[in-house]
Image: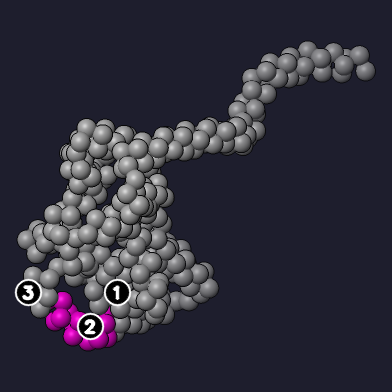
């Protein structure tokens, strides 16, 4: 493939991207006007500080909004699952889904273009099927890279909540046994636990804000379990709701649940420790053992080469 043909191919690709952007802009003009009207009216989807601060999520959503239409799911169930994953990652902004989908589409279109422009500058550019394969791999990388980043964010956030929640539950138990209500205990623990885990402190503060706004306790606790996605928090919410429904002692239920969480955390630590032997097997075989054999048998091999082999040769 000659340089002229490569240039024509690049122009066709750029024209296709421009056409996609134009079509996306035309199809989303009505949706953009509706979102603008809602922002002016003050409806920000639960994020009252969004119009004032303009965080990076909103700026990214505005920049990639035409592209987000091409990555939207056809079913509402998949969209709801993706929104839950964004909540689990701590992205509660009303336009987080638009920013995420727009970023996936933008990377899927931009990375192949960068690969094409980069290979034009190389002394031996790719041609034919090799160029097409490289551009397809770049497009796949750009499309699935946000999924990997989102999964990593969810895993880190849920791990932090899991490790900090038993300590916070102990503080809640102490506050309830001292005579505080559940709402007051959650507010006090949210202030004290922020030095241990700012993520968990923020979630407990949101529960307090929902309760102050007049939301039922069951609804606020269900929202806490939905935002975190941690099994231990879900069981804590179910325990509080059942204790309130059946009229049992909340302090006693909290103490039993705290003991169960500590036991579960210890068992998980023991499980991770038991996996160390298997995880160290491959590094031992492929990294440490060859070095040990080289150190132990190296001098003997050198002595054999210098002394024993000349002696055998002289004897023959």
Q: Identify the disc placed on residue 76.
A: none
Which of pointers 3 and 2 indicates the residue nearer the eye?
A: 3
64 drawn magenta: no
Q: Position of residue 149 (x, y in %)?
A: 37, 55
**Is the stretch drawn in magenta largely helix, strand or loop?**
helix
Dot 3 alpha-carbon crowd within 10 angstroms: few under 14, some 14 to 19, many 20 or more: few
Q: Which residue is mark 3?
A: 41
Q: Are marks 1 and 2 in contact (CB under 8 Å)?
A: yes
Residue 195 seen by the camera? no
Q: Earlier in the sequence, mark 3 or mark 2?
A: 2
- Which element is circle 1 on? helix
The residue that appears at 24% across and 55% down in the rendered structure is 217
Q: Which residue is mark 1?
A: 68
Q: Earlier in the sequence, mark 3 or mark 1?
A: 3
Q: Measure the C-alpha gap from mark 3 to mark 1.
A: 24 Å
Q: Is residue 39 left or right of residue 132?
A: left
The residue that appears at 46% across and 63% down in the rendered structure is 124
28 drawn magenta: yes
Determine whether 203 is above or below 2 in the image: above
Dot 2 alpha-carbon crowd within 10 angstroms: few under 14, some 14 to 19, many 20 or more: some
Q: Earlier in the sequence, mark 1 or mark 2?
A: 2
- Most extreme residue toward the right is 316
Q: Quadrant of residue 2?
A: bottom left
Q: Between residues 266 and 92, which one lies in front from this camera angle?
A: 266
Q: Which residue is mark 2?
A: 28
Q: Position of residue 251 (x, y in %)?
A: 31, 38
Instruction: Read off the magenta span.
Output: 21-36
Q: Between residues 134 and 53, which one lies in front from this camera angle?
A: 53
Q: Measure the C-alpha gap from mark 1 to mark 2.
A: 9 Å
Which of pointers 3 and 1 indicates the residue nearer the eye?
A: 3
Q: Measure the C-alpha gap from mark 3 to mark 2.
A: 20 Å
């Amino acid at each position: 493939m000659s340089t002229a043909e490569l240039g024509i191919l690049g122009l066709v690709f750029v024209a296709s991207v421009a056409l996609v952007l134009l079509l996306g802009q035309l199809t989303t003009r009505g949706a953009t006007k509706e979102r603008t009207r809602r922002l002016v009216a003050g409806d920000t989807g639960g994020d009252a500080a969004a119009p004032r601060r303009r965080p990076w999520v909103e700026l990214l959503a505005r920049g990639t909004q035409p592209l987000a239409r091409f990555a939207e799911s056809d079913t509402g169930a998949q969209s709801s699952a993706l929104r839950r994953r964004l909540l689990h990652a701590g992205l509660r902004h009303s336009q987080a889904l638009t920013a995420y989908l727009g970023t996936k589409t933008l990377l899927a279109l931009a990375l192949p273009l960068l690969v094409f422009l980069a290979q034009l500058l190389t002394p031996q550019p790719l041609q034919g099927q090799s160029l097409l394969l490289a551009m397809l791999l770049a497009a796949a990388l750009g499309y699935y890279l946000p999924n990997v980043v989102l999964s990593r964010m969810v895993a880190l956030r849920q791990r932090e909540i899991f490790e900090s929640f038993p300590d916070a539950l102990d503080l809640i138990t102490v506050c309830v046994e001292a005579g505080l209500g559940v709402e007051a205990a959650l507010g006090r623990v949210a202030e004290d636990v922020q030095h241990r885990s700012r993520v968990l402190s923020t979630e407990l503060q949101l529960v307090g804000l929902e309760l102050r706004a007049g939301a039922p306790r069951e609804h606020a606790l269900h929202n806490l379990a939905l935002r975190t996605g941690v099994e231990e928090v879900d069981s804590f919410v179910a325990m509080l709701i059942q204790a309130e429904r059946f009229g049992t002692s909340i302090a006693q239920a909290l103490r039993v649940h705290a003991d169960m969480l500590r036991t579960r955390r210890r068992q998980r630590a023991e499980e991770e420790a038991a996996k160390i032997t298997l995880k160290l097997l491959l590094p031992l075989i492929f990294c440490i053992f060859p070095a040990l054999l080289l150190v132990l048998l190296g001098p003997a091999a050198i002595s054999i080469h210098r002394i024993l082999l000349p002696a055998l040769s002289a004897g023959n």
